[in-house]
Image (cartoon, rainbow, N blue to C red):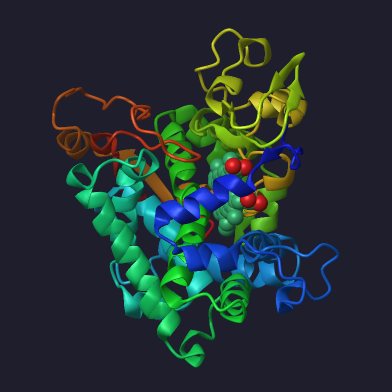
C-alpha cells in the first residue's frame, strides 16, 4: 500500500493541493510536466516533475550530511538553546517569546517559538522576518482554520482562513522578489527549490503558493507533538523527575551534548515515540488510478483510499486493552513496536516523512534543555483563566485533544486548553 506508486497515486493528491492553494493552470502544467532536459533532471536516473523534485530536495536537506549539519546543528539547535538560555539568537524572530525567571509563559506560545521560530529562521534566514515580522501569528491562524481549506468551505465562513493564507503567500511573494544576496543565509532546500522553479519558468505567485505548501509541511507538526510531550511530563511529577535525571549527562559546563540526549536517554526517547502514537491522528490519503487488489478485493480507479492512523495507533491487538492511555516506557519495554505495522506516525513507503529524525531529535533536545534548566510548575490560576474558568479545579485538567477539526499529522489541543507555566531557574543546575 505505502510502496505502491503505480496503481495508487500520491501525485494526483499533490496536484489537487496545488490547485486548492490557487496555483494557476500554467503553474500546474509547469510543475507537473516531465522535462528530461530541465537542469534539475541532469544526473537523475529517472526524470522527475518539479513538484515531486522538491521532495527529493527535502530528503537531501534532511539526510545525514553537511546540509543537515548546517540546518540542524548550526541553526535550529542553537536557536532552541539560546531561547532556553534567554539569550539573543543569530537570527531574531521578532515575535520571540519573553521568558523571564518566574514569569508565566504559555506552553503553546513557547512551543511555537522554539520550533516554528527556529525552523523558519533556519530555512529562510533573517530576510523572512524583515518581510513579515508576524509570520508566525499568520501561520497560527492558518493552523486553526485550515480545516476550512481542506473542506473547501465557502468564503462567507472562511474569511479568517483566506486572510491567513493570503498573508503567508504574500510573505513568500515579497521574499522571493528580494535580491538573492539578501537571502544568502537560507537553507539548501529553499535555494534549490527556488532555482528549479525559476528554471522551469514558474511565475512568482505560483512559486510563493508552492513554497507555502512546503512551509506548512515543515512547520505544522513538530510544535504540536512537542506540546503534548511537555504537557504529559509536566502533569506527571514522577515522570518529570525521572527524565530530568536521565538527561543530566547531556548538559555539562554550560554546554550541551545533543548526541547524548538522542542516544543515551531511552525513557525520553520512548516518551516522544509514545506521544507521537497518540498525537498523530490524520489519515494517509491516496487516489486509486488503476484496479488494485487488496485483501481479496479490488479497489477500482476513481476510489480514494485512506490509512486511518488514529485507529491503527489505537489497535487493541497491538497496544493493549487501554490504547488511549499513555505508557511513557512502552518503547523501552518493547522496542520492536517501533517497527509495527500499526505504528506510522511519519507515514511510510515512498512518502515517509523526511523530517522524522530531525523532529524527534529537536523535541527531545528541547524537552531535555527545558527541564534541566528550570523547575517547572503549572500556574493553576492563569491556566484556569485561560480555560475560561469553566473547569476550575485546584489542579487544571490535562489539555484535551481537539478531534472535532481535521488537521494534517498531529492534533492540536482545544484553543482554551493551553497550559500556563512558571519556569524558575533550578539551583545547582548543570548548565
Ligand atoms: C513530529 C513531527 C512530524 C510529523 C508527525 C510528521 C508526519 C508526516 C507524515 C505522516 C507524512 C506522510 C504524509 C503522506 O504520506 O501523505 C509526512 C510527510 C512529509 N513531512 Fe513530515 N512530519 C513531521 C515533521 C516534519 C519536519 C520537521 C519536516 C521538514 C523539516 C517534514 C517534512 C515532510 C515532508 C516534506 C513530507 C512529504 C514527503 C513526501 O511526500 O515525499 N516533516 N510527515
Residue under the image location 48 percent in, 57 percent down: 213
In the image, residue 119 above or below residue 297:
below
Residue under the image location 54 percent in, 65 percent down: 76
Residue with the most extreme top position:
321
The answer to which quarter of the image holds residue 146 is: top left
From the viewer's perspective, is 255 left or right of 291? left
Q: Position of residue 195 (x, y in %)?
A: 60, 79
In this view, the residue in front, 58 or 305, is 305
In the image, residue 288 above or below residue 102:
above
From the viewer's perspective, is 313 left or right of 154? right
Give the total of numbered labels. Answer: 0
Q: Do we see residue 96 in this rendering? A: no
Q: Position of residue 419 (x, y in %)?
A: 30, 39
From the viewer's perspective, is 2 left or right of 164? right
Q: Do we see residue 28 in this rendering? A: yes
Q: Position of residue 238 (x, y in %)?
A: 49, 28
In this view, the residue in front, 279 or 55, is 55
| Quarter of the image where the N terminus is located | top right
Residue under the image location 74 percent in, 21 percent down: 294
In the image, residue 155 above or below residue 267:
below
In this view, the residue in front, 160 or 292, is 292
Q: Position of residue 397 (x, y in %)?
A: 29, 24
Amino acid at each position: 500500500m505505502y510502496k505502491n506508486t503505480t496503481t495508487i497515486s500520491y501525485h494526483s493528491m499533490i496536484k489537487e493541493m496545488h490547485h486548492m492553494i490557487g496555483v494557476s493552470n500554467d503553474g500546474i502544467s509547469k510543475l507537473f510536466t516531465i522535462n528530461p532536459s530541465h537542469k534539475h533532471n541532469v544526473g537523475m536516473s529517472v526524470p522527475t516533475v518539479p513538484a515531486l523534485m522538491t521532495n527529493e530536495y527535502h530528503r537531501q536537506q534532511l539526510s545525514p550530511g553537511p546540509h543537515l549539519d548546517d540546518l540542524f546543528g548550526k541553526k535550529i539547535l542553537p536557536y532552541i538553546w539560546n531561547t532556553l538560555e534567554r539569550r539573543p539568537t543569530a537570527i531574531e524572530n521578532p515575535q520571540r517569546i519573553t521568558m523571564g525567571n518566574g514569569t508565566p509563559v504559555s506552553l503553546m506560545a513557547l512551543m511555537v517559538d522554539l520550533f516554528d521560530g527556529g525552523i523558519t529562521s533556519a530555512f529562510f534566514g533573517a530576510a523572512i522576518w524583515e518581510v513579515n515580522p508576524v509570520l508566525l501569528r499568520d501561520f497560527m491562524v492558518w493552523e486553526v482554520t485550515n480545516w476550512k481549506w481542506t473542506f473547501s468551505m465557502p468564503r462567507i465562513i472562511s474569511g479568517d482562513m483566506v486572510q491567513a493564507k493570503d498573508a503567508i503567500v504574500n510573505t513568500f511573494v515579497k521574499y522571493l522578489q528580494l535580491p538573492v544576496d539578501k537571502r544568502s543565509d537560507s537553507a539548501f532546500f529553499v535555494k534549490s527549490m527556488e532555482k528549479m522553479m525559476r528554471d522551469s519558468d514558474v511565475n512568482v505567485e505560483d512559486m510563493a503558493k508552492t513554497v507555502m505548501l512546503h512551509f506548512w509541511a515543515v512547520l505544522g507538526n513538530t510544535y504540536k507533538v512537542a506540546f503534548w510531550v511537555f504537557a504529559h511530563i509536566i502533569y506527571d511529577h514522577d515522570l518529570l523527575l525521572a527524565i530530568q535525571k536521565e538527561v543530566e549527562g547531556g548538559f555539562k559546563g554550560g554546554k550541551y551534548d545533543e548526541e547524548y540526549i538522542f542516544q543515551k536517554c531511552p525513557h525520553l526517547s520512548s516518551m516522544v515515540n509514545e506521544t507521537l502514537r497518540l498525537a498523530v491522528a490524520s489519515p494517509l490519503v491516496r487516489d486509486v488510478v488503476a484496479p488494485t487488489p487488496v485483501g481479496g478485493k479490488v479497489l477500482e480507479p476513481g476510489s480514494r483510499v485512506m490509512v486511518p492512523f488514529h485507529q491503527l495507533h489505537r489497535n487493541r491487538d497491538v497496544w493493549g486493552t487501554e490504547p488511549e492511555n499513555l505508557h511513557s516506557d512502552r518503547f523501552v519495554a518493547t522496542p520492536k513496536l517501533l517497527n509495527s505495522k500499526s505504528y506510522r506516525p511519519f507515514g511510510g513507503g515512498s512518502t515517509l516523512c523526511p523530517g522524522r529524525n530531525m523532529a524527534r531529535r529537536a523535541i527531545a533536545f528541547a524537552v531535555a534543555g527545558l527541564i534541566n534548566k528550570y523547575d517547572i510548575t503549572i500556574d493553576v490560576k492563569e491556566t484556569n483563566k485561560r480555560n475560561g474558568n469553566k473547569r476550575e479545579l485546584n489542579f487544571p485538567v490535562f489539555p484535551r485533544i481537539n478531534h472535532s477539526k481535521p488537521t494534517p499529522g498531529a492534533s492540536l489541543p482545544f484553543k482554551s486548553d493551553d497550559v500556563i507555566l512558571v519556569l524558575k531557574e533550578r539551583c545547582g543546575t548543570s548548565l
